[in-house]
Image: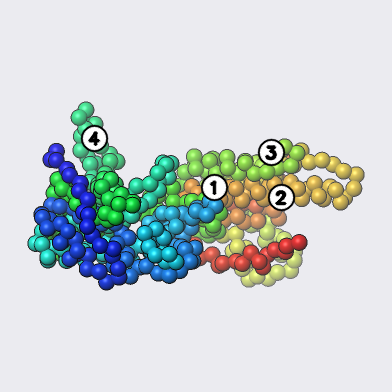
Amino acid sequence: MSEITVSGVPGLPEIAQGANLATLIAAAVPDLADGDILVVTSKIISKAEGRVISADRDDAIAAETVRVVARRGATTIAQTRHGLVLAAAGVDRSNTAPGTVVLLPEDPDGSARRLRKSIGDLTGANIGVLVTDTMGRPWRNGQTDVAIGAAGLLPLRDHRGQADRFGNTLEVTVAAVADEIAAAAELVKGKTDQVPVAVVRGLPELVIAAGADPGGDGPGAAALIRPAAEDMFRLGAADVLGERRTVRDFTDEPVDKAAVRRAIAAALTAPAPHHSQPWRFAIVESAAAQIRLLDDMLAAWVADLHGDGFTEEQIARRTRRGEPLRRAPLIIVPCLLADAAHTYPDRRRNAAERAMFLVAMGAGVQNLLVALAVEGLGSCWVSSTLFCGPVAGAALDLPEDWEPMGAVGVGRAAAPPAPRPDRDPASFLVVR
């Protein structure tokens, strides 16, 4: 391992819009050499690029936010259009004039590429450039700098397939070297020392040789952002309820049985009257059981519609509403067990008691659907079994006191659901 040095670059002036950062940095570091890595705080890039605005901070955060991940008090954790997840969507009001806020660079990787080329033209040195910002981290106190833009160096070092000193093959180790370098550079830059740039030397193997590819700049810091499909922790507190969407088309991929049971465990945390546990769930896994259930319910539905005088065309159109269950790899039939319900001598209180248990059942079903979404599974709640409870119970050989409360189709969504329309809460409430 060669010696690695990290040096701050003092003496840079206050940066204003239009400042030529390449000229200023090249003058401040006249000995830049091949293999050096220049680490630049994003704020001075934002200032040079005119990303300082006069605006209310909350309004600026809302404008920069693509997705709110979590909120607590005055703190908002948000995803930006860059794909970054950080506090306040990266909007900063430190080290800027009162009444103004600094936004992240519009394209941090693009900023890094332009700065690398300009400095290379001025000095002839083949360097790497990192653009950094400060972030907090889940499960850890404190903040650290990370790379949000990169050019001319490999942001990740892949150790998979290599053997450790004991001969074990590394299977998942991919080092985020760009973030490691960013954090090391912060040790010499500081937050209040007005040293926004550092030079890291001793890692030439990470710097891409000039002309190594058509752009010569590498994949950028975008390679550090985990794709949503691979992110086990994508859903923040603000995302969870909205993630539950009705899915009517599923892939043929088998459903993880353990995930279903975890979702049912979440359903069992719903509130219920009289300290009871009124929820029961029939998991219909086998194709034979699914066909028997759906065919028997369909026959009962068709018989009811015939009795109502509907035509064959009308019946076919109506019964198509149940087809999502036939496309689902797995079906869950939530059932109500109201054995803890109290009995009263009048209809009014008995009706209220019944409604109380139905509300608890609805809470359990909602918990189930949300938990399935958290597990990455799509679902649709179809009310069919409510109209033919005895038929569904017989098809599944359920205990007589289990009342089917609809059926839930479960599986991997075949396509992303359509955007949910915004609903103004004011249209759904009164205040007294």
User: Residue 208's x, y, as percent?
Assistant: 15, 55
Instruction: Measure the C-alpha gap from mark 3 to mark 2.
Output: 13 Å
- Dot 1, crowdedness within 10 Å: few (<14), some or many (≥20)? many
Q: Amino acid at mark 1?
A: Ala
Instruction: Measure the C-alpha gap from mark 4 to mark 1.
Output: 35 Å
Instruction: Measure the C-alpha gap from mark 3 to mark 4.
Output: 48 Å
Q: Amino acid at mark 3?
A: Gln
Q: Are marks 4 and 1 in contact (CB under 8 Å)?
A: no
Q: Is residue 242 above or below residue 342?
A: below
Q: Find disc 4 in the rendering and name its residue.
A: 169
Is residue 417 among the parts visible in the rendering? yes
Q: Quadrant of residue 117?
A: bottom left
User: Residue 222's x, y, as percent?
Assistant: 30, 57
Q: Which of marks 3 and 1 precedes in the sequence? A: 3
Q: Find disc 3 in the rendering and name its residue.
A: 277
Instruction: Using the image, tell me which numbered label, if any, was put on residue 359.
Output: 2
| Residue that protrudes farthest toward the top in the picture | 166
Q: Amino acid at mark 4?
A: Thr
Residue at x 49% of width, y 39% of height = 258
Give whichever of 238, 139 is nearer the camera: 139
